[in-house]
Image (spheres, rainbow, N blue to C red):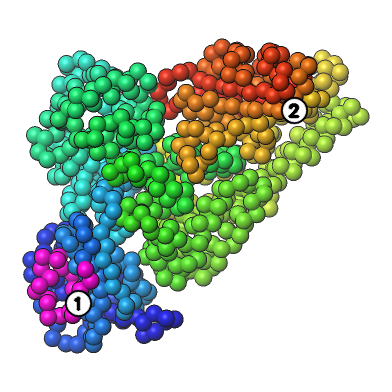
Amino acid sequence: MVLGLIVWVNLNQAVVVTPSHLAGPEQKAVQMLVEEVEKRTTIRWPVTQSWPSESRPVIVVTPAAQLEAFRNRFTTAPEAARGPEGYRIWVERREPSVVFVVGNDTRGVLFGAGRLLRCLRMEKANVQLDAGLRLASAPKVKLRGHQLGYRPKTNSYDGWTVPMWEQYIRDLVVFGTNAIELIPPRSDDAPDSPHFPLPQMRMMVEMSRLADAYGLDVWIWYPALDKDYSDPKTVESALLEWGEVFRQLPRIDHVFVPGGDPGHTPPKVLMPFLEKQAANLRRYHPRAGLWVSPQGFNQQWLEDFFEILKTEPAWLTGIAAGPQIRISLAELRRRVPKRYPIRDYPDITHSRHCQYPVPDWDAAYAYTEGREVINPRPLGHARIFQLARPHTDGFITYSEGCNDDVNKIIWSSLGWDPDADVLEILREYARYFIGPRWEEAFAQGLLALERNWQGPLLANAGVYTTLQQFQAIERAATPQELANWRLQMALYRAYYDACLRSRLIWETALEEQAMAALREAERVGTLEAMRRAEAILRRADRPGPHWSWRQRVFELAEALFQSIRMQLSVPRYQAIAVERGANLDSIDVPLNNRPWLEERFAIIRQLQNEQERLRALQEILRWTDPGPGGFYDDLGNPMLQPHLIRGPGFWEDPEFRQSALIGFARQIHGLRTSWRDHAEALYDAPLRLHYTGLDPNARYRVRVVYAGDALNRKIRLVADERYEIHPLIDKPIPIRPLEFDVPQEATADGELWLSWTSEPGMGGNGRGCQVSEVWLLRR
């Protein structure tokens, strides 16, 4: 059959032929190939060890070591790609056609079968392959894995059965994943979930067994959570606890212990404890490795850690690089002895308060869709991968559920071929998981979802275009396609984004009308002006133009719970917390200043005379006015931060180590919108503002609001790098503006640099230097 310029081989009647002796994972590869074709086409290929006597297409699946048995069935095979896990696939142009899938080794057979599945064009009762297919491939990155944590904190995994886990592991294998990482029963999590189909330990054993059956590496992320590992009794208890987990798992290749996030043990105590655990591990799995990360370490602990590494302990296998490490990946590689490989542990699952936050994310998204939203970021994560690759020996990503499914596939695919085109990866994703007729539309839709998060939401009319693209798919999709959880996730995001933009436009207009009502206070009276303003703001409670989209979001949330156990609400689906992906519960969070205004109005009404109330209302109306010769920055709003030194930005600095980052408060109730977000600098980096065109003869004051999610951390302000405006101080709670004099020497040249820093040498997440608003006031 000829479609366009491609000649297609029809494989409806094909038979799969294998050597008589296949290793267990090779048999799994054949089973995966046959079953995944059947699911998509209703065609089940027979499997045999002998060549069929009748004339029908044949698919040969074999390791290279047994290819000679089929020597008379092909002419010239492609030259093998060098390296383990590689494969060759080609079509012998004869009648009937023969397709060869030849693995360099056992894993090569598995990944060759996966690649064939991605190349096939599969529809109901029809399966075809490009007759000109001829390729040889081997992975460029040795370790390509993802953390699959069966625990309550995840937004879906805790509801998965063993068959669901096997299906997902297969899905990852098809795109080149060769490792999974499990989490033990005791971690930084609740002890149980209402969604667990099996106890945690039993499921952990089952997942280890599944990975072993497919020949994948099994890692364990094992946090050291006990209070004091300098106590021999604590160590003895931990050795017994961990040893019991090690004993029960059929396969363990490596154990990774994070130094922090969670964890709180200084390296001088942690490392001797891990030496004992390494011996404990190797009692049951003699070839298993033990890895550690310096996550969460403050500067002193980090230096202690590197001093220990200088002794090059033999029990230690390697170092993991993850979130909350004070130094960059390049610096970590420079300081770690060369004998130790570095495994990346990138956070692909979170969108804010994380290692790789969405750059300049609109606050409306941050407060509603939240930290664990469905988050396809194909181009962003491709960039993160490329920047990290020179400094690591592979990766196992940090995941908290299937919300980051697209990101997993991007990492696995680029781990196999770092030069792969992102759009082509998305086309394969769409063709394999959704169906060939949606290949282009769905791939482009995923890119559009990423673009939805770029720039101010008020100005991003493309959000509605994205929804229209997915609605076109939705209208034409079959009932079976509409039941596909990957399509449901994309639809959920598209509808949610559009609903949010519509509501933002509506509520922004309502606030503008409310402000206009307050400006009439001198004419109609303050009490009447506030009553009118509140009445206008309360119109947001009525069903608005976004209402039908909002209803569809709720319908898709129910569909996702039924299809993939995604818990998008705490009361409806018993998610563990709103922050853990349950953004159905935050879909109506106010997007304007209504809560703050209503609180202010209640206070103003208590004032005794009209003139005091008028002054209070004028303060609201002129909040951002710095006065003649003054300047104002709303540092959490990318459109209103003209004096902020942004730095290199996401494309060169996706961890924002040298760049100003837009961050968000965790609790926003009663806060001005300008206090809900902020600009921040991480660890010891300064947050800097630069002013020009100042009057050299004038005196200035700086008014500043310190908000954010780290109100417990102190902050310091310096002018021109030498004039201390204030030392390290506690941030005021409740949040309020503070004012300080600026030394006239700092502005005598007509310019001013303001630099904020937080507590030096801090560990943890490095957040503390957070500033929401700044006025430079001419006195």
Residue 425: percent from left, percent from top: 40, 60
**First along the sequence among labels 2 and 1:** 1
State left or right for residue 737 relative to residue 493: right
**Residue at the image point whose x is 65% and y is 28% from the top:** 690
Residue 67 lies in the magenta stretch: yes
The residue singled out by tag 1 in the image is 76
The residue singled out by tag 2 in the image is 693
Residue 688: percent from left, percent from top: 59, 27
For the C terminus, which image quadrant? top right
**Residue at the image point whose x is 55% and y is 67% from the top:** 472
Confirm whether residue 334 shows in the render: yes
What is the magenta range? Answer: 60-79
Between marks 2 and 1, how big is the CA–CA gap? 74 Å
**Residue at the image point whose x is 26% and y is 27% from the top:** 224
Is residue 233 shown above or below 123? above
Is residue 355 shown above or below 775? below
**Residue at the image point whose x is 14% and y is 82% from the top:** 52
The reply to whether callout 2 and callout 1 are in contact (CB within 8 Å) is no
Give the image quarter of residue 309: top left
Q: 265 and 483: which one is in front?
A: 265
- Amino acid type, mark 1: Thr
Residue 706: percent from left, percent from top: 60, 22
Q: 295 and 25: which one is in front?
A: 295
